[in-house]
Amino acid sequence: MRVILAEDSTLLREGLVRLLAEEGHDVLAAVGDADLLLAAVVAERPDVVVADVRMPPSHTDEGLRAALEIRRRWPEVGVLVLSQYVERRYATELLTADPSAHSGGVGYLLKDRVAQVDEFLDALERVGDGQAAFDPEVVRGLLVRSTHTDPLARLTGREGEVLAEMAQGHTNAAIAARLHVSQSAVEKHINAIFDKLGLTGESAAGYSRRVLAVLRYLET
């Protein structure tokens, strides 16, 4: 894949450049702030952008705002956002963008997950394929609700587990393997989930669209 990196930590940035190059990916640019990131996307039009949420000058949300602009201006570009912590507002803003308007994948990982090289590379591949890749901790943060408004209260324990795996971006086959159940059982659970969450009228043909539809519903 053709990748642009945006990370203000020189050590992490250079480590990622080396890792991606060793995996056969083409790192088009590796920059340290959001303005340089946007300029690089304009010049290179990558397959995927990997961007830190917090970058200079204020170290608040520059990277996230750049990621949202990339999603808006270049919907075919996949965006994988990295964050030191689960930042609920930022994750929600990124993930609840209209999925039908984007062909590029989307992901949100905690930086600790980058140290798990296989997990990071798997997430990058999924985003590059137009799918979704959400950190389990991010998913748990997004799914938290009060008992009065929690739409998950209608789900069984197993359906809740399947939903969490779906929200991380796993395929039905992967969910079956991770939960040690058959793929047909997973499909039945997913049908029940969409029914209980009132999503039976939504199109579930697109993989990342299915995941984002669930998250969008839960954020309403």
Image (cartoon, rainbow, N blue to C red):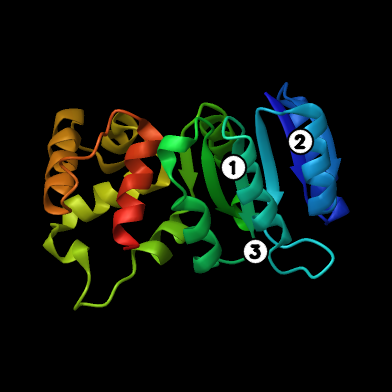
Label 3 SS: loop
The three-letter amino acid code for the residue at tag 1 is Arg
* Residue drawn 65% across the image and 56% down it: 64
Along the line of sight, the residue nearer the viewer: 164 or 216:
216
Label 3 sits on residue? 84
Q: Residues within 10 Å of mark 3 (few under 14, many from 20)?
A: few
* Residue drawn 64% across the image and 53% down it: 82
Label 1 sits on residue? 71
Label 2 SS: helix
* Residue drawn 52% across the image and 41% down it: 106
Residue 193 lies, in percent from the top left, at: 17, 48
* Residue drawn 54% across the image and 32% down it: 104
Where is 138 relative to 149, above or below? above
Q: Which mark is residue 41?
A: 2
Q: Quadrant of residue 54?
A: bottom right
Q: Quadrant of residue 151?
A: bottom left
Quarter of the image with the C terminus is: bottom left
Residue 26 lies, in percent from the top left, at: 77, 24
Residue 186 lies, in percent from the top left, at: 19, 37
Calculate the distance from the C-alpha at mark 3 to the C-alpha at mark 1.
Answer: 21 Å
Calculate the distance from the C-alpha at mark 3 to the C-alpha at mark 2.
Answer: 24 Å
Q: Is residue 18 left or right of residue 205?
A: right
Looking at marks 3 and 1 on the same chain, the residue that comes earlier in the sequence is marked by: 1
Quarter of the image with the N terminus is: top right
Q: Residues within 10 Å of mark 2 (few under 14, many from 20)?
A: many
Calculate the distance from the C-alpha at mark 1 to the C-alpha at mark 2.
Answer: 11 Å
Label 1 SS: helix
Looking at marks 3 and 2 on the same chain, the residue that comes earlier in the sequence is marked by: 2
